[in-house]
Image: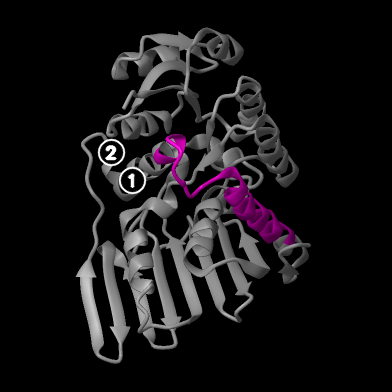
Amino acid sequence: MKPLRFAMLGCGYWSQFQLAGWMELEGAQPVALYNRTLSKAQALGERFGVARTYDDVEKLLDSEELDFVDIVTNVETHAEIVDAAARRGLPVICQKPMAPDLPTAERMVQTCLDADVPLWIHENWRWQHPIREFRRALANPELGRVFRARITYSNSFPVFENQPFLAELERFILADMGSHILDVARLLFGEPSSVYCRTTRITPGIHGEDVATVVLGLANQATVTCEISYASKVEHDRFPETFIHAECEGGSVELGPDFSLRVTTADGTMIRRCPPPRYPWADPAYGVVHAGIVACNENLLAGLRGNPAETTGADNLKTVRLVHTAYRSAARNACLPLDE
């Protein structure tokens, strides 16, 4: 099939991996790059063979023949760029978090609905191979209903060193990592009906919270606890691995350190490893995350071809609502219904 032509809007730290992820797939062709600092777009273009670069989004969108845009700019700019693309009838892929606040996220989704253009959020965490394998294992009918689960993302990785802007955010770990982890909770265990959250700040010199604990109550009476931290010095510090444990009526499933997957039923425990694929362009420190970019892009490319894709704007809006309810819960130290 004819490759779909796209522009990447934003050429900061993450864009190099996002663009490399697209290059792993047949059917998507980057033809233009935008960055407000033109030299960054030019440098990225030289690396990846993309000749046309811009420092003006509107000019790029008016000058190029595109099939979609991929937005990798700071969250504060997402809504404006989504609006510009929607006005031109262009399908949109946008990095998470979708927006800095819930009303803006809702407006972005409505803008694309009104323009009759698809909006997807590049929520790659759920596409990590170990997490998908956990999901497949959880579907074993012998296990039955989940009644309690825990998702743990707790480590001491110096995240502020290669992304120093994160230290300036007034809302940090829930907005950043919480968007990923709470989305995984929804994927694996369903939609919550209540949220209770506590947050704290441990790392000196940062503005926002770097530790959060979120307790989700599901309508089926299951409880899911999400532990998120960049301040945890623990024995099994395996950044950026996510550990998951689900207790079910007929057994349990555990995703542990070094991608170990344990499934326990009445017949005993089966153990296997489910490491992610490796790519030469991936930063070894982020290997499992960067591999998830490829799987996510593949699903979004299918969506652009008219097939179902998971992380629509409407679906991700549920995660945004969950994140912002968690912030309200932490501020009030109260368990809140999700629709409050």
Residue 44: give x, y in percent of width and height: 37, 19
Give the residue displayed 61% in from the left and 13% down from the top. Answer: 58
Left or right of residue 38: residue 234: left
Quadrant containing the C terminus is: bottom right
Q: Which mark is residue 286?
A: 1
The number of callouts visible is 2
User: Residue 152 or 101: which is nearer the viewer?
Assistant: 101
Q: Residues within 10 Å of mark 2 (few under 14, many from 20)?
A: some
Q: Amino acid at mark 1?
A: Tyr
The reply to whether discs 1 and 2 touch (Cβ–Cβ < 8 Å) is yes
User: Residue 286 or 235: which is nearer the viewer?
Assistant: 286
User: Residue 176 or 95: which is nearer the viewer?
Assistant: 95
Q: Is residue 217 above or below residue 171?
A: below
Give the residue displayed 48% in from the left and 55% down from the top. Answer: 230
Residue 133: give x, y in percent of width and height: 32, 63
Image quadrant in which you'd find residue 132: bottom left
Q: Which mark is residue 36?
A: none
The answer, for residue 124, to whether it is visible in the render is yes
**Residue interval drawn in magenta:** 302-328
Quadrant containing the N terminus is: top left
Residue 335: give x, y in percent of width and height: 72, 71
